[in-house]
Image (spheres, rainbow, N blue to C red):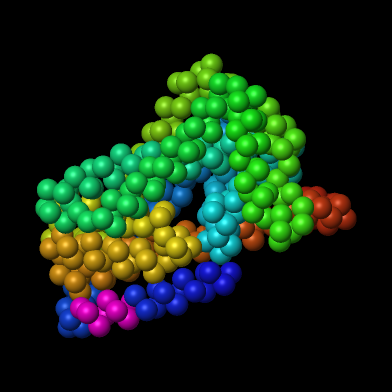
């Protein structure tokens, strides 16, 4: 939570910097000329994006032999995103949400963990396809720098690491178990002086590998099941680019396809590779500066960046907070048999009253 508040402080500093750098009259004129119908349309598009993310989880769960309804996965994926932002832990917050749901529904928590890893892998691979186009546009316009190349290389290494884990699990549970057990040693060595015990268990790593490999075996035997998650991952990026396009239309700012792809690529790159949760403060500044380097006036670039982030980040975060509240309330009702009975009895009484 402290990191989240620190990120908010960074965001306010970035907003202050952008408004000071930009000509205030330009910002005011951009806002005055805005067509708020496009803003409303963009909100509708981001709702489609939320369902697209849920569909991505559904397709991955299905490929691993897990059955979960899309509506439920909509709440789970939104909650996972919310937890990742307010309690950043290298993606483990979202995994914890998936594991909690798996235990509640009685299916394999290891497969749910693999599903989370596969979702991240497809997200990385799908974005790398778009990023390659964005970097090419920046290269052609002589705007490519080392910060963007370094962040891209880091993302590619993260995707490669996840791919190695999944390939090992699909080939052999023993190979994945050995690799995970090997990974536990340096982590335990670093943490042991602080917690005075092993943080990870090698035996649990082997047990997890066996359970995960059982689900990945389905993918190895039927690789065509990976096509649908790939489609969802690519369509997710297309929807976000569409939202950025609507921001240009909303504020009547000239654009080109190259500007949209390159601007989105830089913004989303620093959304993933950022020291602050979900790139709060960093993405707004990086996107505005990227658009400025692509010959968008700084005042208009600042307005577009802030509006785009409001729709693609803060709106889903609010929905995620409500979804997380809904899931935790449902958990309490299930955990309390008296309340569960009351809900069961009250439902037909309400219906009869109607």
Q: In which quarter of the image is the N terminus?
A: bottom right
Q: In which quadrant of the rendered view does residue 23 lie?
A: bottom left
Which residue reaches farthest right? 338
Spot occupied by residue 342 in the image (x, y as percentages of width and height): 84, 56
Q: Nearer the viewer, residue 186 or 273?
A: 186
Looking at the picture, does residue 102 appear above or below residue 19?
A: above
SS assignment for the magenta stretch, majority: helix
- Where are the magenta residues, as a range? 15-22
Looking at the picture, does residue 46 appear above or below residue 206?
A: below
Q: Nearer the viewer, residue 38 or 327?
A: 327
Reply yes or no: does residue 210 show up in magenta: no
Q: In which quarter of the image is the C terminus?
A: bottom right
Reply yes or no: does residue 18 show up in magenta: yes
Spot occupied by residue 121 in the image (x, y as percentages of width and height): 46, 39
Q: Which of 297 and 35 is in front in this view?
A: 297
- The reply to whether residue 252 is visible in this rendering is no
Spot occupied by residue 221 in the image (x, y as percentages of width and height): 53, 16
Residue at the image position 75 percent from the left and 35 percent from the top? 203
- Would you say 34 lies left or right of 95 here? left
Residue at the image position 81 percent from the left and 53 percent from the top? 335
- The reply to whether residue 222 is visible in this rendering is yes
């Amino acid at each position: 939570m402290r990191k989240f508040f620190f990120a908010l402080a960074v965001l306010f500093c970035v907003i202050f910097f952008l408004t000071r750098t930009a000509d205030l009259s330009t910002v005011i004129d951009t806002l005055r000329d805005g067509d708020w119908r496009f803003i409303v349309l963009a909100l509708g598009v981001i709702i489609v994006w939320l369902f697209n993310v849920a569909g991505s989880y559904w397709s991955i769960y299905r490929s691993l032999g897990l059955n979960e309804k899309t509506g439920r996965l909509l709440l789970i994926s939104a909650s996972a995103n919310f937890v990742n932002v307010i309690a950043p832990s290298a993606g483990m917050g979202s995994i914890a949400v998936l594991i909690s749901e798996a235990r509640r529904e009685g299916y394999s928590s290891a497969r749910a963990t693999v599903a989370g890893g596969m979702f991240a892998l497809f997200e990385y691979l799908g974005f790398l396809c778009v990023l390659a186009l964005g970097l090419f546009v920046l290269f052609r316009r002589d705007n490519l720098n080392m910060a963007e190349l370094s962040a891209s290389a880091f993302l590619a290494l993260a995707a490669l690491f996840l791919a190695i884990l999944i390939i090992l699990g699909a080939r052999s549970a023993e190979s994945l178990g050995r690799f995970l057990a090997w990974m536990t040693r340096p982590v335990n060595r670093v943490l042991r002086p602080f917690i005075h015990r092993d943080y990870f268990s090698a035996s649990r790593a082997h047990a997890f590998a066996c359970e995960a490999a059982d689900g990945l075996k389905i993918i190895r035997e039927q690789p065509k099941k990976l096509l649908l998650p790939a489609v969802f991952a690519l369509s997710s990026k297309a929807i976000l680019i569409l939202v950025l396009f609507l921001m240009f239309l909303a504020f009547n700012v000239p654009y080109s396809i190259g500007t949209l792809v390159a601007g989105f690529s830089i913004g989303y790159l620093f959304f993933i590779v950022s020291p602050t949760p979900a790139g709060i403060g960093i993405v707004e500044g990086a996107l505005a500066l990227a658009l400025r380097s692509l010959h968008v006036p700084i005042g208009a670039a600042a307005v577009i960046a802030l509006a785009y982030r409001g729709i693609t980040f803060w709106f889903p975060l609010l929905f995620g907070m409500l979804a997380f509240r809904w899931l935790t309330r449902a958990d309490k009702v299930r955990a309390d048999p008296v309340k569960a009975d009351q809900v069961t009895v009250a439902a037909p009484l309400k219906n009869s009253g109607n």
